Amino acid sequence: MEKKKTSAKRTDTNRELAHVCEIRNGELIRYYGDETEFTVPDDVTTIAYDAFRNCRKLTEITLGKRVTSIHSGAFQGCRKLRRITFPASLREIGEEAFDGCTALTNVILPRAVYTIGDHAFRDCDNLKRVVLSSDLKSLGQGAFSGCESLEEMILPEGLTAIHAKTFFKCRSLRSLQIPTGLQTVGSFAFAQCDSVETLELPDCVTYLGRGAFSECRSLSRFRVPASTRFLGNYAFSCCEALEEIEIPETVTVIGNYTFCACKSLENICLPAALEVIGQGAFLGCGNIREVVLPSGVTSIGKQAFAFAVGLSSVTLNQGLVTLEEGTFTGCRSLESIRLPDSMTTVGEKAFHGCVSLRSVYLPRGLQSIGERAFESCSLKSISFPYRMSRIGERAFANCTELETVIMPEARSRIGAGVFAGCRSLSVLVVPEGLFLLRRKKDRWKVPESTQIIYRAELELSQLFAEWSSTDLTPERRAELRKDIRERIAVLKKRNRLQSMEPLRENLHKVARAVEEQTIAAQEPTVETDVDEIQP
């Protein structure tokens, strides 16, 4: 009699459930009810794909004791769901299972859960507390992205990877315990975690992905794990509070825009093994004062240090061949730069707007200077390598303090407007074989008042500079007297030297320009009387 009653009761229950959900072979296929609370029957083992999707009235659910799997999107969009009770039997949570459950505040997972799918709890805006199972082996990408109220979490020791966007935009996250066996941090894994101030990663981490910590606006210091070889693109971009970064000696590549807009970053010690600095790697790092490139650096990307307005000292390594476009654009505090002897190319706008740049050393092997490369700098003088092949348009335009320029050989291609706005240019030294000088002066925008001196006269000025030294022996002074007289005679014969007066006025300027390029001797210390030694 009792068995009949139990069987009848179960039949009635099944009939009631049939009106609100579809269950087939232990799988809850679809829930049709509009209750605020629901208990999944104990004979259900699986919650099917989209089973409770967009159940707008559901606020509380209790899963049956035998449920082992929640499939993709099972509770997606249940915006009023604020409480869910998981059974001890649960082992897996599928992709987007609770995506958009904005009322959910607390999640405690049973120990048996070993995998959480991609975006499983994405955009659960009010989720503050999550307790993960100790047996968890896989945490999918974007699993907690957009959980803006999440404050803390302990990741179990079984995890070896934090995948892409796992904690993206968790703006309240302050505390996160990282497993000691972690090996990779995926792209944008912690991006826009505004409240994170420090984060300790174990040394076994070998990879930091693209944008891993970008826009962590409270992150003030960080130690890159010792096993890391590559810093991904945008890894720390826009970390406005970042003051200290410790980079291990193992790092060989700093990616594109890795530290872009890290406005508080002051000291940067580049590792000895570094080979590549990506495009915009330190763009807008306004507090960096000094950069010393390791000897192994072979490539610096476009705008790598652009608008680092506090950068005053740069040491470039031998072996560097090219400066790309805009490498040091807008570095307003940079005062001098010595290009290494290995360099052949200075790219477009490489030093554009370096308004404090007063001195630059151009190596003998330099072949090309790009368009606007030194525009709006404060250079006093320039001596181009004689065999240089190209100077781009407006390369030195608006260098208003530029006084003396020594041009390369006549075959060099010089762009239009190369000296436009150089109103202080008083001396231009040109090669002997330069034709159509008047037309070229107009094309280069050389001021009308600029005195033209040929290279033969430059050689004469060098002799004058040495003649003016107080340390000369009588024998050397006699030799110089002879050489100077011979050169003056040659110049007069070629009608290059109509009067000694302009030469006398510009000797010191030319000698100073040569000195800055390590071509000439010390600046004259006594008066040079041209009339004393001319024939």
Image (cartoon, rainbow, N blue to C red):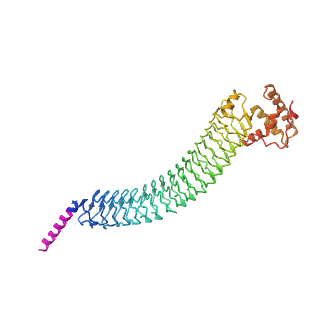
x 54%, y 46%: residue: 279
Location of residue 55 with respect to 493 vertically, above or below: below
Please tell me in which quadrant of the rendered image residue 186 appears. Answer: bottom left
Locate residue 259 relative to residue 71 in the image: left or right: right
Q: State the residue in front, 432 or 246.
A: 432
Where does the C terminus fall, quadrant-wise? top right
Horizontal side, residue 155 vs residue 386: left or right: left
Residue lying at the far bottom of the rendered structure = 2
Q: Nearer the viewer, residue 448 or 495?
A: 448
Q: Position of residue 452 (x, y in %)?
A: 74, 33
Task: Identify the residue shown where x is 54% and y is 59%.
Answer: 223
Classified by dominant secondary structure, the portion drawn in magenta counts as helix
State the image coordinates of residue 337 (x, y, percent, origin top left). 67, 46
The picture places residue 177, in percent across and down from the top left corner, at 46, 65
Q: From the viewer's perspective, tell me whether residue 62 is left or right of residue 236.
A: left
Quadrant location of residue 397?
top right
Above or below for 354 versus 446: below
Q: For residue 150, which quarter of the picture?
A: bottom left
- Find the magenta span and give its range: 1-18
Q: Position of residue 214 (x, y in %)?
A: 50, 55
Would you place residue 185 above or below residue 2 in this image?
above
Residue at the farthest left position? 1
Q: Report if residue 530 lies within the magenta region.
A: no
